[in-house]
Amino acid sequence: MSRGRIVLLVLLLAPLALFALRGPLALRVMERTLARNLAADPIAELPDGLHVLLCGAGGPLPDPVRSGPCAAVIAGRTMVVVDAGTGGARNLQRFGFTPGRSEAQFLTHFHSDHIDGLGEMAMLRWTGAGHDTPLPVYGPAGVEEVVEGFGRAYRQDATYRVAHHGAATVPPSGTGMTAHPFASPAPGAAPVVFEANGLLVTAFAVDHDPVRPAVGYRFEYGGRSLVVSGDTAKSANLEAQAQGVDLLVHEALAPQLVKRLHDAAVAAGRANVAKITNDILDYHTAPVEAAKIAQAAGARHLLFYHVVPPLPLPGLDQVFLAGVSDAFAGGVTLGRDGTLISLPKGSSAVEVSKR
C-alpha cells in the first residue's frame, strides 16, 4: 500500500476511533475539569477591588441567556448577593462563585422574580460550605415574612440532609436564614445597612409603586463604588444616591419591544397578558432613561440588568439600546448571565469580562 493511501486510511479511521473512545475521553476531561474547578478560588484570582457578577440578568420572562435577577458583589474577599431570582444560585455555582462564599443576602423588594430562588440560595450556601450559622438576609420591612416562609418550606429538607450527611457535614445550626429588616429609607436618606471587611452598604428608596417598600443599594470599597437599582421607574432619588458612582447597575425595560408583546396578546385574545404588558410600563425604567440617570450622576459605566423583554433574535440588542449612546457618554454593557465588571482598588479602570 502506498504511503498516500496509508495516510488517507488513517485520516478516515481517526474520527471513527475517536468516536468509539468518546466515553473514556469524556471521563478523562470530566475528571480534570472537576479537579480544577473544585480547587479553584475565583475570588482570590480577582484584583483587590469591587466587582459585580450577574448571576441573573433577566426578569420574570423566560430567557436562555438571562436568568432571574441576581447580582453577586465582591469586595476584596467578601462576597454578598443582591436578590435571588430563578437560576441565580445555580449560576453562581456554574461560574465558580459558589453560594457557600456568600456572607449576606440583600433583597430590593419582594416581587416573586426577585425572591423565588432564595430557598435554594440558602440551602446551597449551607450544604456547599458547611456553615454553622444561617444566611443573613437584609431587606426593608417585610423581609421577616419572606424569610419565615422559606424557612417553613425548607424545614423538612434540612431534616433529611442532616439525617443523611450528618451534623458534622451539615451543621443543623446553619440551616435556613435570619432576617435583618431595616426601616424604609425616606427620600434623600441612605442609611448604612451592612458593614464588614471594608465594605459599606447603604440603602435608598426607589419608585416601584405600588410595590412598597422597594430599595436600591450602594456598595463602597477601597475608594470604588457601584449602585444596584432594583426595580424602579426613573427615580430622582436614585440619581442623587448614584452621584459619582463608578458603576451603575440599572434595570431596564424597552417600551417599544414590550408594546409588541402587548399587541400580540391583544391579537390573540389574551386579555390578561395584554393588561399586564400595559401595566408594567409605568414602574420600570426605559434604557434611555437609565442612560440619562447615569449621565446626570456622573457614572463611569452603565450595566443593564433585569433586561425586559427577552432578546432572542440577532438585532434586538440594537433595538433595546437605541438612543442610549446619545444620552450617556460613558461605557455601556448590556448584561447577560455571567457578565463580570471589575473596579480595581487604587484605579479608575472599569474592566468588563464574561464568565
Image (tube, rainbow, N blue to C red):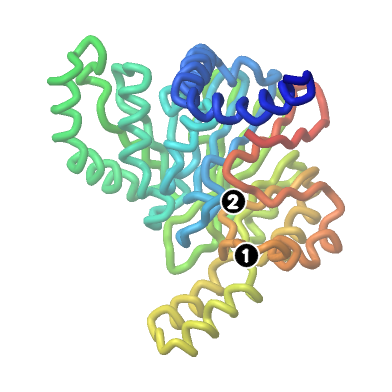
Residue drawn at point x = 37 percent, y = 41 percent: 181
Residue 90 vertical placement versus 223 (above, below): below
**311 and 234: which is toward the camera:** 311
Q: Amino acid at mark 2?
A: Ser
**33 and 1: which is toward the camera:** 1
Question: In the rendered view, does 80 fall on the left or right side of 250?
Answer: left
Residue 290 vertical placement versus 259 (above, below): above
Question: In the rendered view, does 199 fall on the left or right side of 300?
Answer: left
| Residue 204 seen in this snapshot | no
Percent x, y for residue 148? Answer: 23, 42
- Could you say which quadrant of the image residue 75 lies in? top right
| Residue 238 seen in this snapshot | yes
What is the crowding at mark 1: few (fewer than 14 residues within 10 Å), some, or many (at least 20)?
Answer: many
What is the crowding at mark 2: few (fewer than 14 residues within 10 Å), some, or many (at least 20)?
Answer: many
Q: Which residue is mark 1?
A: 285
Percent x, y for residue 298? Answer: 80, 48
Q: Which residue is mark 2?
A: 229
| Marks 1 and 2 in Cβ contact (< 8 Å) | yes
Residue drawn at point x = 47 percent, y = 16 percent: 31
Residue drawn at point x = 27 percent, y = 31 percent: 176
For the C terminus, the image quarter is top right
Residue 119 vertical placement versus 223 (above, below): below
- Could you say which quadrant of the image residue 77 lies in? top right
Which element is circle 1 on?
Answer: loop
Q: Amino acid at mark 1?
A: Thr
For the N terminus, the image quarter is top right
The earlier-in-sequence mark between 1 and 2 is 2
Residue drawn at point x = 42 percent, y = 60 percent: 212
Percent x, y for residue 37? Answer: 52, 18
* Residue 210 disc label: none
